[in-house]
Image (cartoon, rainbow, N blue to C red):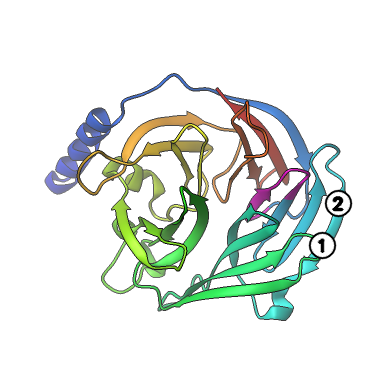
Amino acid sequence: MNFRKTIFTSVCLVSCFLSVQSVAQTIKEIKKFRVTEAKQAVAVDERFFYVINNSTITKFGKNDGKQVAAWDVSKAGIKHLNSGVVIKGKLYCANSNYPEIPMASSVEIFDVNTMQHIGNHSFGIAEHGSLTWIDQKDGYWWIGFAHYAGKEASEGRDVRWTSLVKYDMDWRATESWIFPKNIVALFTPKSNSGGAWGKDGLLYCTGHDAAELYVLRLPKSGYTLEHVNTLPAPIQGQGIAIDHSVKDKLLLYGLNRSENTITLSEIN
């Protein structure tokens, strides 16, 4: 190990030690659904979960896991949906041109009853990076923008440029934060793939592949998200969803690509 790499590793370890103020949390798997299309992300509402896979969306019953409907959204020119969130009967999907450069992104909106494409907000060549996830909290949009290493990197940038950006309801950026160095190291060479706010006020994020959930919160000062916890989870990164229709529990939906399953877990 060379001197520069030694210093970087030491900084990451110190950063991890200083930033992780762990709270007692565990994840317990409750249910598992076998879904062939489980590749990219999952969204959820009161009665259904929605499996998102690049240019398809498949709807399943939450109780029995039976398929209700499926849509091919490539007909609308959509090729790479990264994740989604259901809000008041609308499915808001993070869409990007990954792995193309320059990075371009948009939010694509669907009616969950008809699954008709009903709206769009385009970021074009987004200054923040490639849009991977979206959520809504406290009257604001919260969006994860990814950057990558290696051949997928945007010119002059790498995974360190990955960020969380807060927008008002008219899509005007108001604030942004970067990820802690130890989390960036875990994302590399890919990036932050999923994110969702819990009812506990904490932000739950995933990388691209690891069976882990990264728990973060907004800092009281500065510009770096605070790392609260890293939880082993029965998922393999990618897009996640928190079920806000259940008020007394913190329920997480995620996917396992190697097993082609959607998992429902409880965070305690």
Tell me the quarter of the picture where residue 51 sits.
bottom right
Please state the horizontal and vertical placement of residue 46, each as a whole percent of the image: 73, 43
Residue 250 % position (x, y)? 59, 30
Where does label 1 land, which residue? 70
Residue 7: x and y in percent read 14, 42
Q: Which label is found at residue 146?
A: none
In the rendered image, is residue 131 in sight? Answer: yes
- Relative placement, left or right, of 219 versus 253 is left
* Disc 1 + disc 2, Cβ < 8 Å: yes
Quarter of the figure with the C terminus: top right
Which stretch is magenta? 39-49
Say which of 56 and 199 sits in front.
199
Above or below 27: residue 218: below
Residue 45 is one of the magenta-drawn residues:
yes
- Which residue type carries mark 1? Ala
Location of residue 26 with respect to 124 vertically, above or below? above
Q: Quadrant of residue 88?
A: bottom right
Q: Amino acid type of disc 2? A: Gln
Q: As rendered, which of 66 and 209 lies closer to the eye?
A: 66
> Which residue is disc 2 drawn over?
67
Residue 105 part of the magenta-drawn span? no
